[in-house]
């Protein structure tokens, strides 16, 4: 019997993927993992096999993945060498444990060398590392989470202006929930050596995004295009650290590093993030949530905190 390992089930993304997996796969096939026992306790109580995973412990990971057919690797929330090392440890452990396929949550247009996003560097590296191993794979190249920009929209209401460096660039914003659902469906699929673009249902500019928010909420937020340097200044004023090694404010509406956000905005402005496909529909059989729908239920579609665990 095939066994499917879902990592990070204690997180926002991983928790949704786990709950989706319970609907589309037999419970006896599932192995849910997290860095702590607390993170998997509710699943253990349901009779699901659980294991503890430390992404800094390759030997321990290979034991945790023993007997698995597939492993879901949800990209780590930090950026740079630390993330690449964690991903390498997971991939090496999959090979050592005899795992057949890895499903990895990547980024739209990750392999484009002209994409200026620093986020994409780690994703491109991870994809390449997997491709050079004896592993089958499904890469899910996710668009930007709509929740991040909805949170940003409401955070900017007091000033009346949402300023960033995206200008007229387009993005097919998608819900984090839909990305997690896609991950579960990819795990349950028979796809091999596949790259899927997980995009939202419409390709829009940030001005369009703000207009949708205004239409739904009755607010009158305006959008202002700024330079990359001015965008950094906006985040500096908010107390957002430049890198993921910095100190994040509790409850921040921008729980991401400004290096990541500014270079991501630059990539959008330069047309490096405007991939638009129906891969999500083909994979899951349903349409992804629209930006309008998420604004209509905005209390449910906030980005929340990102937590990394360095065991």
Image (cartoon, grey):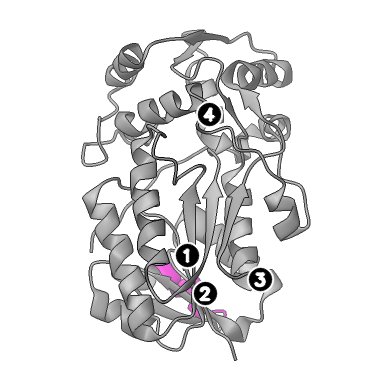
Alpha-carbon distance for marks 1 and 3? Answer: 19 Å
Q: Which residue is mark 2?
A: 43
Q: Secondary structure at mark 1?
A: loop
Left of 55 or right of it: where is 74? right
Quadrant location of residue 289?
Answer: top right
Quarter in which the N terminus is drawn: bottom right
SS assignment for the magenta stretch, majority: helix
Q: Are marks 4 and 3 in contact (CB under 8 Å)?
A: no
Question: What range of the chain is rendered magenta?
Answer: 39-46
Residue 222 location in percent, x, y?
A: 57, 8
Residue found 32% across the figure and 53% down from its top:
308
Q: Is residue 38 above or below residue 225?
A: below
Q: Secondary structure at mark 2?
A: helix
Residue 28 location in percent, x, y?
A: 60, 86
Q: Are marks 1 and 3 in contact (CB under 8 Å)?
A: no
Left of 261 or right of it: where is 80? left
Quadrant location of residue 241?
Answer: top left
Labels 3, 2: front one: 3
Q: Which residue is mark 4?
A: 149
Q: Is residue 306 above or below residue 102?
A: above
Q: Secondary structure at mark 4?
A: helix
Q: Which residue is mark 3?
A: 189
Mark 4: few/some/many CA within 10 Å (<14, 14-19, 20+): many
Labels 1, 3: front one: 3
> In the image, is residue 45 part of the stretch drawn in magenta?
yes
Labels 4, 1: front one: 4
Q: Are marks 4 and 1 in contact (CB under 8 Å)?
A: no
Residue 239 location in percent, x, y?
A: 27, 24
Q: Secondary structure at mark 3?
A: loop
Q: Are marks 4 and 2 in contact (CB under 8 Å)?
A: no
Query: Which numbered tag is attached to residue 9?
Result: 1
């Amino acid at each position: 019997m095939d066994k499917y390992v879902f990592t990070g089930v204690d997180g926002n993304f991983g928790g949704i993927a786990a709950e989706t997996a319970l609907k589309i796969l037999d419970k006896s096939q599932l192995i849910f993992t997290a860095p702590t026992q607390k993170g998997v306790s509710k699943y253990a109580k349901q009779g699901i096999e659980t294991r503890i995973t430390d992404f800094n412990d390759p030997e321990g990971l290979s034991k945790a993945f023993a007997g698995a057919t597939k492993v879901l690797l949800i990209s780590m929330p930090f950026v740079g060498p630390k993330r690449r090392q964690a991903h390498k440890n997971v991939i090496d452990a999959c090979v050592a444990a005899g795992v057949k396929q890895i499903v990895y949550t990547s980024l739209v247009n990750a392999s484009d060398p002209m994409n200026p996003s620093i986020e994409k560097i780690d994703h491109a590296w991870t994809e390449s590392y997997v491709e050079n191993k004896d592993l089958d794979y499904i890469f899910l190249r996710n668009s930007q989470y709509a929740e991040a920009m909805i949170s940003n929209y409401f955070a900017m209401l007091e000033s009346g202006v949402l300023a960033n460096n995206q200008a007229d660039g387009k993005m097919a914003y998608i819900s984090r929930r839909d990305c997690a659902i896609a991950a579960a469906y990819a795990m349950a699929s028979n796809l091999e050596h596949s790259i899927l673009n997980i995009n939202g249902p419409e390709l829009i500019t940030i001005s369009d995004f703000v207009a949708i928010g205004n239409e739904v909420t009755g607010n009158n937020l305006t959008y202002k295009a700024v330079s990359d340097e001015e965008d950094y200044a906006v985040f500096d004023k908010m107390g957002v650290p430049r890198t993921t090694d910095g100190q994040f404010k509790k409850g921040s509406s921008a729980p991401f590093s400004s290096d990541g956000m500014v270079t991501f905005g630059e990539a959008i402005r330069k047309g490096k993030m405007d991939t638009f496909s129906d891969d999500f529909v083909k994979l899951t059989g349903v349409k992804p949530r629209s930006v309008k729908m998420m604004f209509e239920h905005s209390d449910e579609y906030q980005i929340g905190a990102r937590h990394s665990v360095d065991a």
